[in-house]
Image (cartoon, helix red, strand yellow):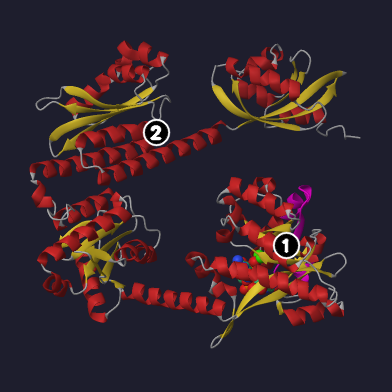
Amino acid sequence: MAEPNDTSFDELFLAHPLPMWVYDLETLAFLAVNTAAVVHYGYSEAEFLALTIADLRPADELPRLYANLKSAPRDTFEKSGTWHHCTKEGALIDVEISSHPLLFHGRACKFVLAHDVTDRVQAQRKIARLNRVYALLSGINSAIVRIRDRDALFKEACRLATMEGGFVAASIDKAEAHGATLRNESHAGCALPARAALLDSGWIATRAARERTPVVCNDIDTDGAMVPFCDHLAARGFRAVASFPLLVGERLEAVLTLVSDTPHVFDADELKVLNELAGDLSFALLFLDREEQLSYMAYYDVMTALPNRRLFQDRLAQLLHAGSHPLLGVALINLDRFAQLNDALGRHAGDALLVQIAQRLGACLPDAYNLARIGGDTFALTLAELARGEDAAEVLQQAVFGALDQPFELDGHDVRISTRAGLALYPADGADAETLFKHAEAALKNAKSSGERYLYYAPRMNAALAARMALEHALQTALEEHQFEMYYQPRVDLVSGAVVSAEALIRWNHPERGVVGPIDFIALAEETGLIRPIGAWVIDAVCAQQKAWQDSGAAIVPVAINLSAVQCMQAELLNMIAGTMAAYGLEQRFIEFELTETAVMDNPDEAARNLRALKALGVQLSLDDFGTGYSSLAQLKRFPFDFVKIDRSFISGVGSNAGDEAIAAAIIAMAHSMGLKVVAEGVETDAQLAVMRTLACDEMQGFLFSKALPAGEFEALVRSGRHL
Ligand code: C2E
Ligand code: CA
Ligand code: CA
């Protein structure tokens, strides 16, 4: 019984800070509304109660509303997603609706909570838009580097603005030689209405041309200056226009105009990016101008038709100016003993060889590499698609040396040449084209004198590269000479305390360094692709071991094998697994696989397909290291996992860090609600174990019970029947 002064449930309803109401499921009329709803929607309580829920909806959402009313569950709590509501003033707000059916004065009703999420939805839209504009900027910058023709560049910029930038129409109007009369030149999104929109908004472009500054109209409906065109434009759904003058020095070259279907898109953030974009286009025009003025020969090598040193450096400078590449490489490639070859075969054969080299490199490298012949027997490349400095060496090895190491045919003879290279990286080795080029030359000189195939300018890069290559080589040897061994770490059931399965963990018995853990070599194996043969060896070794245990009558438990993301992309993985298990005649239930969320989230559709196929083999699947990535358990629902392994980093905080413990508790509750079992990884203390037990975690794995053991010791442990 409530005390006389206690708040009643009615009062709680009225005073609740979020808008709430009850409506009749037959008539859709409101039967009760709380104060927050009255305030938020602007109606008086009496006005509100005279409405039906359909009155809150914009007309175009009514079909969805009626469909939802038909299909919605009549007996349980429901979250029906985000809707639009109109306030009395006519403003449109985004609301998230949660509802629960109930009987109210004997009538079938719904109790509704309406959470206004307009701010959040708008922020999300803005982020999505800005991402599109950044994609546009980077697309245009790569067009600037690639395209040498002004009209083609304009056309591509307009195409990108509509395709990447999400604008409904775009044009670049060239300025007439004198004055600011505009000629409409390049369009995109040129369905008829879009073209008309551009003509109608031409007024804005003209003003931008005259005033030499960007002109923006953020809402055609309300901008007085747009009155003459407003009906035309608004009727087609065009809502905002902006024009940007493209200036080379003082001279107006053209005007870029963008039309959007969303009012107020041209806010400060967006304009900043678009101004930058206009600046980049203007800068490109400056270079195109210069190119047009100078003769072909000043910029090209006539013999190979490749750009010469000057053009190479100019383009490199443009690329650096565009600023769209945080990391760039310059490679210079030189032939060994070209002079002797000229002497031996004759000058004409030497020239023919250079032409063939140019053709071969041109064929194997995309345009973006800016291939050039920069001197007698030296070629240059710009490496723009680098994620890490080491990737430059990769391109050299695979594309460049791969192509040049094949024999050339000269006058009916097969001729092999040897080449060397020098590499310089932006920004580490230089901030401008000239410095980078000079340092690439120095690196080439070092390579030639030291006899290396290629060298970086920075000694640090060379040392890192040498260490990597040594490790790669050693891993190859390890595979050939059977230096790998599988260890087994038991997994224990937290109720029975018994060992119920194990995780197979690889170790490298290094002839000098002793036992090396996977942390020191798996990442490199993944980068180099060596993880494929190593991974195949692991699957084979574990199946062989399980079979041997089974044959010897040992009480075997399922063993989980780690699959790395690189392995998962392998098409033949499934066949290989099925084949190996069949070859050993091993029952599927004795093998499990562990995958991390990054392995599945990179390409979720394909991963879901592969995992279902893997599952169909009869093996169990665990989601490894959970909590370290970005995805939620709910997102992972689509994958057929049986277990979730909570990452060690959370377990180590349990008992000392309330946040970690809360996360672990939430993961366990969520996983259980989805029918998944939970394994706590890296349990090291009794305190952590106790917490995991309280949270109803299913299994544990960790040093508290046992570290990973060689096969023999693991078997002995299982045989001893040791319990937690
Ligand atoms: P993982 O899959 O998360 O494996 C668990 C790691 O945690 C193992 O390290 C294990 O020894 C360690 N561990 C287990 N209990 C405890 C504990 O209580 N405290 C602490 N501090 N550590 C604990 P390990 O063997 O060094 O393996 C490291 C990682 O290397 C593995 O992480 C896995 O991602 C990878 N890896 C190991 N073997 C293979 C393999 O055969 N194939 C692939 N692709 N990756 C493997
Ligand atoms: Ca694992
Ligand atoms: Ca793990």
Identity of the residue furthest to the front in this view: 412
Residue 359 picture location, percent across and down: 24, 55
Residue 7 picture location, percent across and down: 80, 33
Magenta stretch, residue numbers: 667-689
Residue 180 picture location, percent across and down: 15, 24
Picture quarter containing residue 214? top left
Which numbered disc, 1 or 2, marks the residue that appears first in the sequence? 2
* Residue 120 in sight from this viewpoint: yes
Mark 2, residue position? 163
- The local secondary structure at tag 1 comes to strand
- Left or right, 502 with respect to 233, comes to right
Looking at the image, residue 673 lies above or below residue 411 = above
Identity of the residue furthest to the bottom in this view: 512
Residue 60 sits inside the magenta stretch: no
Picture quarter containing residue 14? top right
Task: Name the residue at 70% across, 11% down.
Answer: 50
- The local secondary structure at tag 2 comes to helix
CB under 8 Å between callouts 1 and 2?
no
**Amino acid on which disc 1 is placed:** Glu
Mark 1, residue position? 592
Task: Name the residue at 72% across, 64% down.
Answer: 581
- Left or right, 657 with respect to 428, comes to right
- Left or right, 35 with respect to 258, comes to right
Residue 682 sits inside the magenta stretch: yes
- Left or right, 241 with respect to 554, comes to left
Identity of the residue furthest to the right in this view: 1
Q: Quadrant of the N terminus?
A: top right
Asked whether 715 or 346 is in front, the reply is 346
